[in-house]
């Protein structure tokens, strides 16, 4: 399986286990951030952009379930996998409210663990593809727009425009925010007409491609522009 562009937080206090299983994780994740106790795992989560959490249930300072609870209270969707011994099953039953992705029993069965990792990565990949009005798809990883599974050729400025909106499709962006993002090398000669023309040209080109009028970006007068998914 090809390594994917995701970051996993792996919390395990046993050095040998952490290094051994960490070697396996390197085959599937671009970045692996290690923690040797629960509090360190929480501190890392607060500072880094984590896609997956893999945490041992029994760790010093904070238990794996305490770490899972802390993270789940801040992110309802992030996949959390707990590693436990057979004797910890009662603890896992108490963790139902944490909506764990799954759990791995020690000693770790590599085939089971790899299958679990593949399933998680597949889910993450699907969540990184945004459907736009059931016509286009935008891939957050390669920052490209697709129509009927083929990439849409966009100009440099159109790509910058789409990239800005993709950082938060629910946000209304002001003319200043759009201008500074696209023409950051020309902020001394601000011309908001360039913003209007770019958006108009972008939508006209997509309309021509699809064969009907497309309205992805809406002008919220006196406020800014919003994207219509």
Image (cartoon, rainbow, N blue to C red):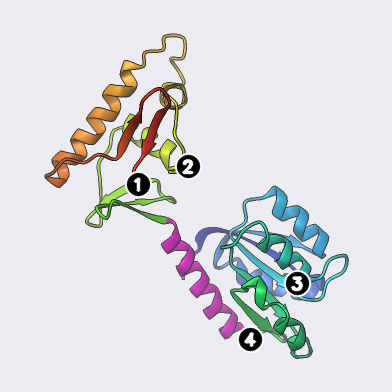
Q: Position of residue 174 (x, y in %)?
A: 44, 26
Q: Which residue is mark 1?
A: 144
Closer to us: 108 or 197: 197
Q: Which residue is mark 2?
A: 167
Q: Are marks 3 and 4 in contact (CB under 8 Å)?
A: no
Q: Are marks 2 and 4 in contact (CB under 8 Å)?
A: no
Q: Are marks 1 and 3 in contact (CB under 8 Å)?
A: no
Dot 1, how many residues are within 10 Å of its Cα: few (below 14), some (14-19), or many (20+)?
A: some
Q: Position of residue 196 (x, y in %)?
A: 30, 23
Separation of disc 4 and disc 1 at Cα? 38 Å
Q: Position of residue 198 (x, y in %)?
A: 29, 26
Closer to us: 15 or 124: 124
- Sequence-wise first label, 3 or 4: 3
Q: Which residue is mark 3?
A: 65
Separation of disc 1 and disc 2 at Cα? 13 Å
Residue 97 occupies quadrant: bottom right
Q: Is residue 115 left or right of residue 179?
A: right
Residue 213 position (above or below residue 184): below
- Magenta region, residue range: 109-128
Q: Which callout, 1 or 3, points to the residue nearer the camera?
A: 3
Residue drawn where x is 75% and y is 65% of the image? 67
- Sequence-wise first label, 4 or 1: 4
Q: Main secondary structure of the magenta part?
A: helix
- Sequence-wise first label, 2 or 4: 4
Q: Which residue is mark 4?
A: 109
Query: Per the image, is 138 magenta?
Result: no
- Give SS at disc 1: strand
Separation of disc 1 and disc 3 at Cα? 38 Å
- Sequence-wise first label, 3 or 2: 3
Residue drawn where x is 55% and y is 73% of the image? 117
């Amino acid at each position: 399986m090809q390594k994917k562009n995701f970051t996993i937080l792996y919390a395990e206090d046993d050095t040998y286990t952490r290094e051994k299983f960490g070697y396996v994780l390197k085959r599937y994740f671009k970045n692996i951030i290690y923690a040797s106790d629960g509090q360190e795992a929480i501190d890392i989560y607060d500072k880094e952009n984590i896609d997956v959490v893999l945490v041992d249930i029994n760790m010093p300072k904070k238990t794996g379930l305490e770490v899972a609870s802390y993270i789940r209270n801040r992110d309802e969707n992030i996949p959390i996998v707990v590693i436990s011994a057979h004797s910890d099953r009662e603890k896992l039953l108490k963790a139902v409210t944490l909506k764990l992705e799954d759990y791995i029993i020690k000693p770790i069965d590599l085939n089971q663990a790899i299958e679990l990792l593949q399933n998680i990565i597949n889910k993450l990949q699907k969540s990184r593809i945004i459907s736009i009005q059931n016509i286009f798809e935008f891939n957050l990883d390669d920052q490209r727009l697709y129509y009927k599974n083929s990439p849409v050729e966009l100009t440099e400025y159109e790509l910058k425009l789409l990239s800005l909106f993709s950082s938060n499709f629910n946000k209304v962006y002001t003319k200043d925010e759009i201008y500074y993002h696209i023409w950051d090398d020309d902020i001394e000669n601000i011309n908001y007409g360039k913003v209007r023309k770019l958006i108009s040209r972008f939508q006209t080109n997509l309309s021509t491609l699809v064969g009907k009028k497309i309205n992805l970006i809406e002008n919220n007068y006196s406020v800014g522009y919003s994207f219509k998914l």
